[in-house]
Amino acid sequence: MAKDAVKSETGERRVALGERRRVAEMSPEEMRRELLTSDVTGLPNRRAFDEAGRAPAIAMSDVDGLKALNDFAYDAGNALLRAMADALREAGLEAYHDKGDEFLCRGHNTKELHANLERARAILRDRTVTVQQTEGRSLSFTGANFSYGVGKNINEAELLLKSHKAEREARGEIARGELRGIAIKKDEPKKSVRRIRRFRTTPVLSNPRPPSLLP
């Protein structure tokens, strides 16, 4: 047991040294970009949001059913987060991935933020998200959605987000720990059909004639 622990610890040490070597090779700009970017979505992270300073309007949002979806299939939650990030970008929003299922946006005014967030919701709802699984299997889902709140600062945005979620819960659109409104489809790999080759055979006579004798 101790031997295995030593092996594991040595392996972790090697990985850590490898990570340090890669960081040491980064330029200052690459290191800054790494520090300010979400690994999962590629969006700027919360640190980047804080460093951007104040904005006239702030939005806070979170995705529906992230944990339930991730429990349903490995990496489906991350696929949903990436789809959310893409929808926010395509709607023209200055978006940031805060943590888990939470996203932040900055805008020039609350009206513009509302309009762009509704556009992002429509994009996400209509999008089919595919997750590749083991042995050629795949899973796809559509109908993902999110709640949001828009205010003049982050505290107001968070308060309005909670209000929006409560309204949607009252309508039965969302429920804690459940997947609602998301249609999931599983694709199994096609089984290969073994083909049996047919060979042409020469018929064998039951009573072959003896060869003729030469005189």
Image (spheres, rainbow, N blue to C red):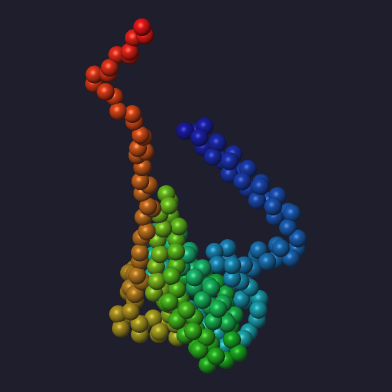
Question: At which x and y percent is residue 203?
Answer: 30, 28
Question: At which x and y percent is residue 85?
Answer: 53, 72
* In the foreground, 188 or 139: 188
* 36 sits to left or right of 174: right
Note whether residue 159 is visible: no
Residue 165 location, quadrant: bottom left
Residue 70 location, quadrant: bottom left
Q: Residue at x 49, y 73 (%)?
A: 84
- Residue 98 lies, with reference to residue 206, above or below; the image says below
Name the residue furthest front.
215
Name the residue furthest left.
206
- Residue 207 lies, with reference to residue 5, above or below; the image says above
Q: Residue at x 48, y 63 (%)?
A: 78
Q: Residue at x 74, y 65 (%)?
A: 29
Question: At which x and y percent is residue 213?
Answer: 34, 9
Q: Residue at x 39, y 74 (%)?
A: 143
* 81 sits to left or right of 177: right
- Residue 28 lies, with reference to residue 96, above or below; the image says above
* 200 sits to left or right of 103: left
* In the foreground, 134 or 17: 134
